[in-house]
Image (tube, helix red, strand yellow):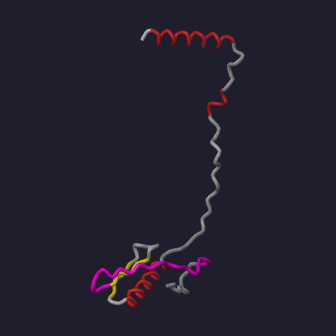
Amino acid sequence: MTLNLPSLKLSQSLPVKFHILLDRSNATQIRASFIELPNLHVEASTQEEALENLKTLLYTYYDKLEIIPFEIEEISTQESENPWLKFAGVFQDDSDFAEIAKSLRIERYDDIDNY
């Protein structure tokens, strides 16, 4: 079933098609709800009455809403540059740093051997 909603202010979104769930598990009442909008539901004694009440509820609901198009910019899938890369190679030609790095390595290996 398609509900025709001509007076809704949905701009270019018309026609809108919803799927309606009819629950007849109660012997005296039929519960009708939109699958897409589960919070909107009504109960009535007949299917026709339930559909009409649901349609009225939808009009009331959409009368308070506004649909605004919102575009999200594409996020680059490339990883951002590692901030430490700007320091890579800074000391490659520094002989003093080479000596310091060598002594640090020797000290580390001595600490590991002492465990």
Q: Quadrant of the rendered structure where residue 88 is?
A: top right
The vertical placement of 83 against 22, above or below, is: above
Q: Quadrant of the rendered structure where residue 26 is?
A: bottom left
- Residue at the spot x=60%, y=78% of the render? 11
Q: Position of residue 45 (x, y in %)?
A: 32, 89
Q: Which residues are magenta?
A: 11-29
Question: Is residue 19 on the magenta stretch?
Answer: yes
- Residue at the spot x=58%, y=80% of the render? 14
Q: Position of residue 49 (x, y in %)?
A: 38, 90
Residue lying furthest right? 93
Q: Position of residue 94 (x, y in %)?
A: 69, 14
The vertical placement of 75 against 10, above or below, is: above
For residue 41, side relative to residue 10 (left or right): left
For residue 89, side relative to residue 45 (left or right): right
- Residue at the spot x=69%, y=23% of the render? 89
Quarter of the figure that contains the C terminus: top left
How many numbered callouts? Answer: 0
Question: Is residue 10 on the magenta stretch?
Answer: no
Q: Quadrant of the rendered structure where residue 90 is?
A: top right
Residue lying furthest left? 27
For the residue pair 44 and 47, the one nearer the viewer reads as 47
Principal secondary structure, stretch drawn in magenta: loop
The vertical placement of 79 against 29, above or below, is: above
- Residue at the spot x=65%, y=38% of the render? 81
